[in-house]
């Protein structure tokens, strides 16, 4: 069986596509063999040496096509040479008359030209195909080498969802080779988790890219290997389209972010610990200062009172900063709790507008909303959001001006808008200002102190109330921040503790 398959492969010209070995030995041997066979047929089967007929022409055309397609131009030409020589041999050995010899020589010359033409055309096409196949194979090898050197894992699936190729890193990351014929969207990767839940096959980014042509960027997954070790990955995927825009494959990239995650956790733990350690002495300092100030004679406007008041103000700022740091770590670890209760949001907004107006004489902070709008939410946290937005409105309106606070009911939601006519935010920055520690890197910004935590904390608080926070702004013309939260209770009873893990 193996021998038969080997013989079939040896004879099959398709087996030689892409292999640029153009030996003439096999064409010479086969053509000579066919000539000898023809002689045998002429002398033994037909019993008439002069009756070599037109079948020999068809045989030779087929032979030249076959050999040119198998062994290139050289193979085709070798077959042409043997055929022409055989025709000359027939002319010399068959005792033709002078007229027949002349006619036969003319036909032989004509046939030789046709044969050489066929051999050249088919041989040229065969060699061209070989070059293209070889070029593609080289290209593939080059790509594979580059992909294997990359520090990220790369996987490509074809239109039938099968893995077309993957690089070395993929196997290292998964801790095992993907089984042969692995189909994305069908086969499962045991131990894969997304936001704490097991990942079903159709949820992978590569499946979205392949079936919906969607670009998926930087989703974080956890993969547990067979040996029990757990790694974190940032996974992206993109569809590959042909010239008509149809998706015929998809590529996915896995970036191992385990070390980065561990570092982040350590950093969060450190910030959390440091903030807790700082909070206690700061609170005591504030209490001592309050006591000292309250015991001082109110009429005393001397240097000591001024110094103590300014230390008290700075201690207050320090306390706010430490609370913000603690909030950030609470958000990171999913420990930010909400204590919901019904309260007047318009009352709160009016109260804060009054406080800010009094503390910043250069700004006119006005409350323009309706009174008596009640929400069920965490009063302390919502107050923190509005305070931060108002403080920003004042901070980023250095030349003073109007700041308007409005509260209105929209369907089942309550909308709070804070509008200032300050420095504004560029369009490119608007989506990023809600990111952790993001600050606009304008040269003018250096004069505004801050750490870029306020809006991040505000967005998290609003999102945990199942609401949204947006900004509409133009550079140099001011900004409008809009907070929308559901009016009704986001939990079943009031005064419940709500914790959302990594929303
Ligand atoms: P920061 O402590 O830097 O104020 P925030 O998270 O509160 O941090 O704000 C992030 C960035 O958004 C700020 O650095 C500032 O560039 C921009 N920003 C926030 N509010 C306003 C505003 N009302 N007008 C202009 N820029 C603002």
Image: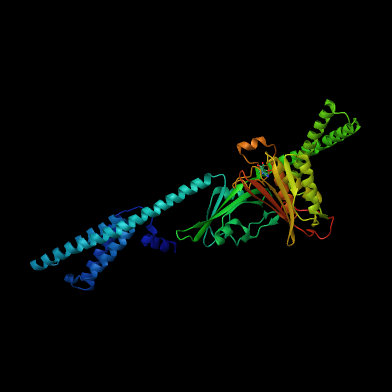
Task: From the viewer's side, name the closer residue of 137 and 303.
Answer: 303
| Colour scheme of the rendered structure | rainbow
On screen, 80 above or below 321?
A: below
Which residue of the protein is positioned furthest toward the left in this rendering? 98
At which x and y percent is residue 136? 42, 53
Q: Residue at x 22, y 67 (%)?
A: 39
Task: From the viewer's side, name the closer residue of 400 and 62.
Answer: 400
Q: Quadrant of residue 100?
A: bottom left
Task: From the viewer's side, name the closer residue of 125 and 180.
Answer: 125
Quadrant of the drawing holding the N terminus: bottom left
- Residue 97 seen in render: no
Image quarter for ligand 1 = top right
- Residue 294 seen in render: yes
Q: Quadrant of residue 95?
A: bottom left
Direction from residue 321 to residue 288 in the image, left or right: right
On screen, 53 above or below 390?
A: below
Q: Quadrant of residue 28?
A: bottom left
Q: Residue at x 83, y 26 (%)?
A: 303
At which x and y percent is residue 345? 79, 53
Direction from residue 141 to residue 17 in the image, left or right: left
Which residue of the protein is positioned furthest toward the bottom in this rendering? 46
Q: How many marks?
A: 0
At which x and y percent is residue 150? 54, 45
Q: Residue at x 74, y 57 (%)?
A: 408
At which x and y percent is residue 349? 78, 50
Task: From the viewer's side, name the closer residue of 103 and 363.
Answer: 363
């Amino acid at each position: 069986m193996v021998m038969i398959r080997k013989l079939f492969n040896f004879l099959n010209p398709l087996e030689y596509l892409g292999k640029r070995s153009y030996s003439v030995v096999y064409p010479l041997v086969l053509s000579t063999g066919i000539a000898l066979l023809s002689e045998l047929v002429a002398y033994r089967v037909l019993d008439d040496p002069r009756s070599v007929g037109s079948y020999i022409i068809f045989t030779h055309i087929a032979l030249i096509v076959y050999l040119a397609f198998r062994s290139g131009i050289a193979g085709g030409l070798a077959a042409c040479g043997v055929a022409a020589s055989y025709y000359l041999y027939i002319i010399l050995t068959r005792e033709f008359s002078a007229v027949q010899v002349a006619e036969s020589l003319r036909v032989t010359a004509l046939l030789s030209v046709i044969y050489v033409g066929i051999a050249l055309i088919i041989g040229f096409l065969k060699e061209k195909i070989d070059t293209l196949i070889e070029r593609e194979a080289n290209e593939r090898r080059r790509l594979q080498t580059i992909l294997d050197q990359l520090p990220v894992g790369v996987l490509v699936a074809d239109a039938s969802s099968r893995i077309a190729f993957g690089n070395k890193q993929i196997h290292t990351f998964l801790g095992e080779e993907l089984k042969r014929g692995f189909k994305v969207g069908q086969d499962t990767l045991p131990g894969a988790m997304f936001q704490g839940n097991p990942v079903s096959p159709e949820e992978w980014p590569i499946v979205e890219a392949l079936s919906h042509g969607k670009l998926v960027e930087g989703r974080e997954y956890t993969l547990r290997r067979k040996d029990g070790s757990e790694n974190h990955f940032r996974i992206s995927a993109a569809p590959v389209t042909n010239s008509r825009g149809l998706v015929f494959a998809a590529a996915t990239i896995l970036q191992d972010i385990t070390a980065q995650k561990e570092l982040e956790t350590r950093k969060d733990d450190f910030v959390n610990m440091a903030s807790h350690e700082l909070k206690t002495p700061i609170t005591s300092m504030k209490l001592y200062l309050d006591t000292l100030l309250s015991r001082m004679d109110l009429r005393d406007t001397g240097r000591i009172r001024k110094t103590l008041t300014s230390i008290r103000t700075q201690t207050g700022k320090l306390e706010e900063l430490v609370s913000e740091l603690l909030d950030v770590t609470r958000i990171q670890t999913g420990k930010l709790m909400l204590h919901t209760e019904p309260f007047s949001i318009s009352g709160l907004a009016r109260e804060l507008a009054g406080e800010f107006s009094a503390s910043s004489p250069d700004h006119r902070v006005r409350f323009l909303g309706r009174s008596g709008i009640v929400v069920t939410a965490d009063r302390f946290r919502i107050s923190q959001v509005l305070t931060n937005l108002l403080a920003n409105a004042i901070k980023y309106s250095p030349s003073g001006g109007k700041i308007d606070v409005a509260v209105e009911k929209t369907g089942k939601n309550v909308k709070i808008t804070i509008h200032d006519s300050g420095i504004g935010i560029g369009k490119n920055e608007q989506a990023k200002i809600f990111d952790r520690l993001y600050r606009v890197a304008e040269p003018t910004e250096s004069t505004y102190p801050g750490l870029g935590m306020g809006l991040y904390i505000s967005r998290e608080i609003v999102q945990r109330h199942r609401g949204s926070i947006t900004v509409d702004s133009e550079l140099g013309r001011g900004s409008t921040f809009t907070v929308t939260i559901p009016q009704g209770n986001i939990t079943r009873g009031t005064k419940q503790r709500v914790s959302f893990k990594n929303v």
